[in-house]
Amino acid sequence: MGCKKANTGIDFLQYLERDMSLYIMRFLHDPADLVRASSVSHFWQQFVIENGFAKELCLKTFSGCSNFLGTVNESKGKNQDNNNSLETDHEVYAALLYAFQKSKLCVSCGTKEGISASSTNNYPRHCIANTRDIPNIPSLDKSTYWSSNGQRNSHVPETLTYKLHSGIWAITEIYVRPCPAEGSPNVFSSKSVRFRIGHSKSPRENDRDPIADDQVDWTYISPEFPMKQEHRVQPFKLPQPVLCFDGYLKIELLGRIQRHKKDGLFYICVSYVRALGHDLFPAFDAKIQERYGKPLLVYNPDKLEDVFEIYPNYEWMRPWALSLPRRY
């Protein structure tokens, strides 16, 4: 007796209840799988788009993704049909996930300018500009670094604020190197560190000028990380990549440990700060909608391959870069 041939043409999405279908489809964690699922049939395509799986996956992957007011696909021109907003969201967020996976991790991204410090020692060579020097270079003048003012209270915090590079970045890790103070062998580190990332609430004529806290929309605040009292680059991996654009990085140095023998006061000294992440520009950009104070995520499909290009070989950074723990 011959076996009856199984019917393999049944579309389970059309037979299962919607909640069960949603439950199953949410196991897709790869943007490529979402693309494949949406190409099975017109019904599957509509199901994936209408339920916003690509956007949902982005919200799980990136911190700061929920801050976007909407999306724009540049290939569709300026007069996009509002009725196709779900389809545009699907295209943009799926491409964002794909770009993040395929782009190269940039060793030298993020910090463009040190623009302000909560306090600075009176010596000119102890300013925030010195925290962007490349560490472990033999000719580096070790007397140049940032130093706070001295405090009698060890709980007084300090902050360093930096302008991030233009475009959109997915910041994954931040490096900080505490250092000894001049005339002392001891490392003047903070007890712990916390990071804030955000963007200006309105366009600025000169992004190198100091900026007040209330002028920045701080869309991300990290957990508090303990710092080691060691004179070396310390990597702090963020719990999830943080999307930022034309933004600002604030480093909060919390608590003081070391007194200086010259005056008995507590200081914090830092010789290096750098952010690590994926550069997603020019395929992606953001534009602030001044009416709402929120950004639109802008996608240019013609530039997508540009973010996959290999960055120049930073041979001069190799000695210290290779000394960091491999995380990716």
Image (spheres, rainbow, N blue to C red):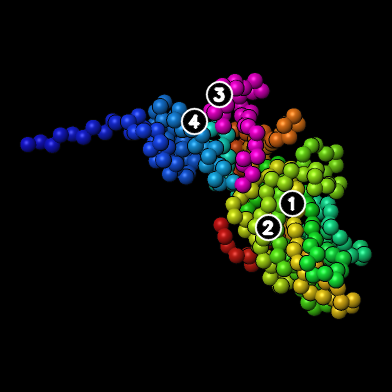
C-alpha distance separating marks 4 and 1: 34 Å
Give the image quarter of residue 55: top right
Q: Tell me the element at label 4.
A: helix
Mark 4 packing: few (<14 Cα in 10 Å), some, or many (20+)? many
Q: What residue is drawn where x is 87% and y is 65%?
A: 149
Screen quadrant of the N terminus: top left
Query: Is residue 90 in the magenta section?
Result: no
C-alpha distance separating marks 2 and 1: 10 Å
| Labels 2 & 1 near each other (Cβ < 8 A) | yes
Residue 67 x, y percent position in the rendering? 65, 39
C-alpha distance separating marks 2 and 3: 38 Å
The answer, for residue 221, to whether it is visible in the render is yes
Which residue has dot 2 on it?
A: 174
Amino acid type shown at disc 2: Ile
Which residue has dot 1 on it?
A: 249
Screen quadrant of the C terminus: bottom right
C-alpha distance separating marks 1 and 3: 35 Å
Front-most of 61 and 38? 61
Amino acid type shown at disc 4: Ile
| 170, above or below 71, in the image | below
Give the residues in magenta. 63-89
- Chain-order first, disc 2 or disc 3: 3
Give the image quarter of residue 135: bottom right
The answer, for residue 110, to whether it is visible in the render is no
Which residue has dot 3 on it?
A: 84
Q: Tell me the element at label 2.
A: strand
C-alpha distance separating marks 3 and 4: 10 Å
Mark 2 packing: few (<14 Cα in 10 Å), some, or many (20+)? many
